[in-house]
Image (cartoon, rainbow, N blue to C red):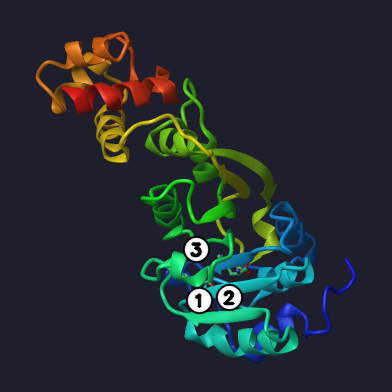
Amino acid sequence: MAQIDDLPPLRDVIAAHGLDAKKSLGQNFLLDLNLTSRIARAAAPLEDCTVLEVGPGPGGLTRALLAAGAKRVVAIEKDTRCLPALSEIAAYHSGRLEIIEGDALKIDPVALAGGDKIKIVANLPYNVGTQLLLNWLTVDTWPPFWSSLTLMFQREVGERIVAKQGSKAYGRLGVLAGWRAEANMLFDLNPKAFIPPPKVTSTVVHVTPRETPLPCKLKSLERVTAAAFGQRRKMLRASLKSLTPDAETLIEAAGLKPTARAEEIDVPGFVALANAFDQS
Ligand code: SAM
């Protein structure tokens, strides 16, 4: 691919700033411009929103987002070593890139929006990726502050996010994501695309919020899915005993079979179970 900007190649940026990847920060840098641009395109259009990027590192994906026309990018990076490299990108794209030094788990993303709709785009650090996704899926106000998530995960995590009932990967994450959003896996990335290469294949997941998820309380849905998938091989009448001694009445009130197992229950089934639990 031709250059996407006149900044130095990422390899040179990494060498110039001594950005040896740190495992403790989940650092696997993506240097292939075709792939960073493909991720940015998957989140398009970007002209009318603020893009929140978690973990820009040396700025490969950041540069692709700006080249793809993002109106404004707010990037949260924990590794202070990356800040000088990111400042060079901010100077080049005057006024369009705001860098925030800190831990994305501790920063309130709503405050960063400045009134705009937010699209979150990130090659997430593997050690905190699932927790960040859970935070974004469990915000109190729905529809949420974000209009889409375009995120890279280990493929195995991506499979759990998009999983439907009946599949091995289906669990609490799939129910929560399926209840509040629509999630799709877009494409895989070979470990060789990264420096250093991770041990596993990565995948890009695209998530859009449902305007009106089936009515139910998040806490109740979390309680019933935790109980059901906590003992996923057992029938519901056994696994839900941790919620109530009279599990069969609860399951029948939800219109489900007490002999069913967690992975056979679809999202509306879990919503019915959560609502029955609420009323019990
Ligand atoms: N976006 C870059 C790319 O695609 O090459 C780097 C991706 S690397 C997988 C993850 C990045 O997240 C690293 O730069 C790391 O320092 C940063 N990071 C790790 N934990 C973080 C946290 N809690 N908050 C913000 N950034 C974090």
Amino acid on which the number 3 mark rests in the picture: Pro
The answer to whether mark 3 is within 8 Å of ligand 1 is yes
Task: Relative to 49, say whether 42 is above or below.
Answer: above
Q: Is residue 13 left or right of residue 1?
A: left
Q: Quadrant of residue 30?
A: bottom right
Task: Relative to 204, say whether 169 is above or below.
Answer: above
Task: Relative to 178, say whether 193 is above or below.
Answer: below
Q: CA distance from mark 2 to mark 3?
A: 10 Å
Q: Position of residue 50 (x, y in %)?
A: 62, 67
Amino acid on which the number 2 mark rests in the picture: Gly
Q: Earlier in the sequence, mark 3 or mark 1?
A: 1
Q: Secondary structure at mark 3?
A: loop
Q: Position of residue 185 (x, y in %)?
A: 63, 41
Tag 2 residue: 57
Tag 3 residue: 125
Q: Secondary structure at mark 1?
A: strand
Tag 1 residue: 77
